[in-house]
Image (spheres, coloured by chain):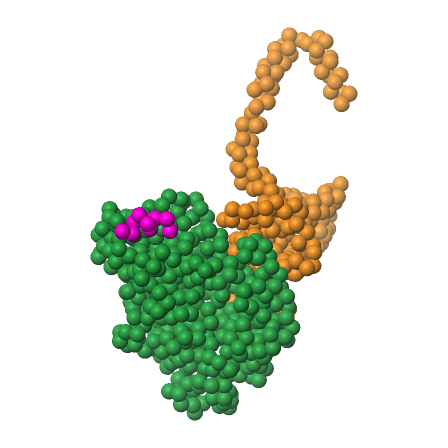
Chain colours: A green, B orange
Amino acid sequence: MIQNDMSRRRLLGLGLGIGAAASLTLAGCGGGDSTSGPAAGNGGKEYTGPKVDLKLWNGFTGGDGDIFKALVNQFNTEHKNIAVSVATYQWEDYYNKLPGAASSGNGPDIAVMHMDQLATFAARGVITELDDVAKNLELSEGDFAPTVWKGGIYNNKRYGIPLDMHPLGFYYNKSVMQKAGLDPNKPPTTKDEYTSALVELKKAGVQGFWVSPFQFTGGMTFYSLLNQWGATLFDAEVAKATFNSDPAIEACTWLVDMIKQGYSPANVGQDADYLSFKSGKNAFTWNGIWQINDLKKSPEVQWGVAPLPQIGSKPAAWANSHNFTIVKQRANDANKVSGAKVFINWLSQHSLDWAKGGQIPARKEVREGAEFKALPEISSLAPELEYAAFPPAAPGLGEVMTTFYNSFNEAALGKKTPKQALDDGVAKANRQLEDNRKKYGS
Amino acid sequence: MADVIEVGAARGDAPPPAANAARRRGASARRTGRATPYLFLAPYLVLFGVFGLLPIILGLWLSVHQWDFQLPNRPFVGLDNYKQLFSSDSAVYGDWWQSIRATAIFTVLSVPLLVVVPLGLALLLNRSFPGRTFFRAVYFAPYVLGVAVIGLLWRFLLDANLGLVNRLLGVVGLPSDTPWVTNMPWAWISLVGVTVWWTSGFNAVIYLAGLQDISPELYEAARMDGASAWQRFRNVTLPGLRPVLLFVITTTVLASANMFGQSFLITQGTPGTETRTVVWFIVEEGLRNNNAGRAAAMSIVFALLLAVVSIANFRLFRYKED
C-alpha cells in the first residue's frame, strides 16, 4: 500500500510526501576518518582539502524537494570546494534502487532515509556506522530529542543522524465545529471532550471522524491509539509481535466503534478522510504533519492543528524521522568523508529552513529558537516529540508492519472482529519475525 | 517415407544431365542454406537467450537458495522455498494461496467477458454506418491509457462516500453507499468492470482484423443458401475466427492471470489482502521484502500453472480442428 500512497500524494499534490527529511551525515566510511579528521577537517566545521563532488539521494518529491534543493544550492555557494548534487526518486523506487546502485558502485555518497529503514539497510550492508561522525561533530543525545536520537541506533551502533521528525497531528475543521456549536478554538484534548464533540457533530448531521481502513491514515491512527492504551506492537527485542494484547484490542475496538456508532461512515476510501475534511464533510482527521503546507494552499478551509487528543491512558503519536546516512563505498575517499561531514553539520544548523517545508527539526537548538516558534502550526506539534512512538529498529520490519496495517484494514472494513483480525495478524507477524531472524541472524 | 527414398534412389541411379546440374546447384544451395535459417534466427536467439532462457535458469537457481543479493550469505536451501508454499505453518503459505485464489477469481470472471464483449463490439464496428471510424477510436481509446491513469481515475470515481458513481446512483434512486472498492463482492465487480472497459478495445481490434479476413463470398454463398444471421455467424464467422479466437483467449488468459496494477491501485488489495494477486505478491516478496529465492520459487510454480492452462487451451482448439 505504501507505493500507492506515494503516487496518491504526488497526484493530489498533498504536499510534502511522506515526509521529508533529514539530516545529515555523510560521508564515508568509518575508516576514512582517522586520516581525514585532523588533516582535512575538524569535525565537520570546515573542509580545506581539494574540491570534492558528493552525490546525495533523497525521496523528496513534493514541495519539500524544492526547499531541500534550495538549501543544497545555498550550501554549494558558500562552499567552493564541495559540490553536492541531488537526485530525487519516489521513496518506494528509491529504497528498491539504492542497494543495487550502492553495490555496483553507482550509489550516492549520502542517502536520506526514514528511521524505520535504517536497520534493514544497515543489516544489508548498504550504509555504514556513523558513531565517529557524531563524535567528530560533537553531536549527542542532548542536541536532539531522545526518541529521535535513539532511533538512529541499530545493534548499538549509530547509522543515521536525524534531520527532522514528522508525527501525526490532530486536524480540526473550524467551520464544521462552529456549525455544530463547538468552540473552534478549543479542540478536544481528552477522550470525554472528544466523544462529546462527536455527539454534538452527529446532532448537526456531521459524521465528525472518518476512520480510514488504510495505513494512511487509519492505520497510523490505530498505531497511535495502541500506544496511548499502553500497548506495544512488539516486545522489547522485536522478537514477538504483541499487537493483539488486551489494551491493543481495546484501542482497535474504540476506533472501529467510531464507524459502528455512526461517527464515521463505513468503507472510507483512500484519501476520503482527508478530502472530506477539506470539503467540510468531516470535522476531525488524524493526519501527518506534511498536510500543513497542503492545507495552507486552500485558504477557503478554516482549520487548525494540535497534538493528538489523549484517548487512552497516556499521550502517544505515530511518528517517523528522516535521517542522513552514509553509503558504503567500494573505495574510501577521506576527502569525501570530510566534505560530507561539513555538509551534514551545515544542514543540521540550517534545519529551520527545512522546518518551513513542514517538518519539526530534530536539532534542539533550532527547535527551541524563536524563529521556529514563529511557525505556529508546525511548532504546535513539537510537544509530541516527547512521546512520539517511532517504529522499532529491526531489519526486515517493513513486511511485518504491512501485516499490522492489513490486520487493521480487516477490522475497519468489518471483515473480522478486532480481536480476530489482530490475533491472525500477530500469528503471521511472528512467523515473519522468525524468518527475519534466520535471514539477518540477529 | 518409402516414396521419398525411392525417388532419391532413382535419381541417384540415372540422373539426366540437366537434372544432374540442377541437383548440384541445389546441393550447394542446401549446404549454405543449412546456416541460413540459423543466421536469420540468431538475433532473436540472442535476445531470447539473454532475456528469456538465462533468467529462467537463474530463477531456477535462485529458487533453491535463500537469496538476498545484498547479503554475503546466500545459503543453499534445497526445496525449502517450494515446501514453504505448500506447508501451512510457513509465513507465506496463507498469503500465497490467497493470491492464487484472487488471481483465479479475477481470471475466471474477466476472461469470458473479455472474449465475448470485444467480439460483439467488433461485429458492430465491422458494419458500415456513419461515424464508424469515430466509434472504433472511442472503444479503443481507454486502452492507450496507462494503468496508473485508469487506476487512480476509477479509484476516485468509485469511492464509496465521495465518488461520482455512487452519487449518480443516488440521484436515480438506487443505493448510493455501495463499497465499490473496499468490500466484497463489489471489489471484484469493479476490478473486472474496469478491466473490461479498459482493455476490450484491444481485443476488438484483433477481432476486427480477423473479421476482415473472412471472404465476403462465404457470406454471400451462405445467404443464397438461405442461412439466417445467426447461422451465418455460427457457421461462417466463428469458424473463420478460430485462429484469432485462440490467440485472443490465450493472450487474455495470460493477461488476466498477470493482473497487478488494477488491484494495486484501485482496491489496494482490500479488504485485507483479498484482492492481492499473484504477480503483486511475487513483486512484494522479491523486491520489497528482499526474499528473491522465495519469489523465484513462486514465479516458477505460477509459470507451471499457466503453462498447464495454456496447453489445455491449445488442445481444446486443436481438437476442434481435427
**Residue A191: x, y in percent?**
50, 86
Q: Nearer the viewer, residue A2 or A434?
A: A434
Instruction: Name which residue lies at 47% across and 86% down.
Output: A190
Q: Is residue A34 magenta?
A: yes
**Residue A211: x, y in percent?**
52, 77
User: Where A162 falls versus B23 (above or below)?
Assistant: below
Instruction: Name which residue lies at 56% across and 81% down.
Output: A254
Instruction: Name which residue lies at 41% across and 75% down.
Output: A386
Screen quadrant of the C terminus of chain B? top right
Residue B173 shows in this picture: no
Query: Furthest-right residue in view?
Result: B2
Screen quadrant of the N terminus of chain B? top right
User: Where A86 falls versus B240 (above or below)?
Assistant: below
Q: Nearer the viewer, residue B276 or B83?
A: B83
Residue B25 shows in this picture: yes
Left or right, B206 with reference to A172:
right
Number of numbered labels in the structure image: 0
Q: Which residues are magenta?
A: A30-38
Quarter assignment of residue A42:
bottom left
Q: Nearer the viewer, residue A180 or A117?
A: A117
Left or right, A105 with reference to A405:
left
Quarter assignment of residue A111:
bottom left
Instruction: Name which residue lies at 57% across and 27% down.
Output: B37
**Residue A38: x, y in percent?**
27, 51
**Residue A327: x, y in percent?**
40, 52
